Amino acid sequence: MWVDSIQKNFKFLISDNVNLIKVIGNKVRIENWKALFNLPNDDLSIENAIILDHTSRWPLCIDPQNQASAFIKKQGFDLKKDLFKVMKATDDKLTSEIEMSIKFGKWLIIENLNEKLSSEFESILTPQIRIKGKTKILKYGDKEIE
């Protein structure tokens, strides 16, 4: 089994009972999320919030019950006010709003995406970032955004 191979070859310690909440969760922060932003009190929601909080990439949330959306919206409206926007995938101004969000570090929730994403989202979910001097440049479609 691959786990045995990793333990033997790389001498990693492996535990069967790893719990993301106990390993990197912050009890005070989690309680704040629940109290201030209506985070549901189940392990999966808490683990997802921890992942969102620690990620350095743009998350793609599969959210059929709109729990993640409600949590992120509440957090965004309370913390980011002017840097937060919600749009539908069919909005005519979506492409320009994505560009502005990348350029100015705004939060953007795109709702009602289909199961099959258009190719324009590929450059966001797997960003191609290059550094020119002290500036990071992201390629989005045929444009480069600083």
Image (cartoon, helix red, strand yellow):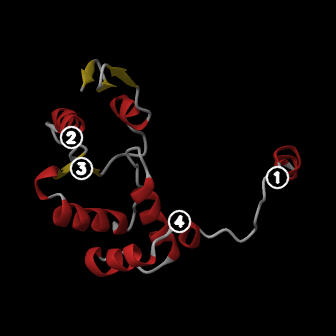
Q: Earlier in the sequence, mark 1 or mark 4?
A: 1
Q: What is the distance, in whole Å, between disc 4 and disc 2 at their CAs?
A: 29 Å
Which residue is rendered at x = 40% and y = 59% of the image? 53
Q: Nearer the viewer, residue 60 or 3?
A: 3
User: Split into 4 quadrants, where in the image is the C terminus?
Assistant: top left
Q: Quadrant of residue 132?
A: top left
**Could you tell me the amino acid type at mark 3?**
Trp
Q: Nearer the viewer, mark 4 or mark 3?
A: 4
Q: Which mark is residue 107?
A: 3
Q: Nearer the viewer, residue 104 or 108?
A: 104
> Where residue 5 sits in the image (x, y, percent)?
87, 47
The furthest residue to the left: 82
The residue where tag 1 is placed is 3
Q: What is the distance, in whole Å, between disc 1 and disc 4 at their CAs?
A: 22 Å
Q: Earlier in the sequence, mark 2 or mark 1?
A: 1
Q: Which mark is residue 101?
A: 2
**Could you tell me the amino acid type at mark 2?**
Ser
Q: Earlier in the sequence, mark 3 or mark 2?
A: 2
Count neighbours of disc 4 (C-alpha within 10 A) and say few if under 14, some if 14 to 19, many if 20 or more: few
> Where residue 99 sits in the image (x, y, percent)?
21, 33
Is 85 displayed left or right of 2 in the figure?
A: left
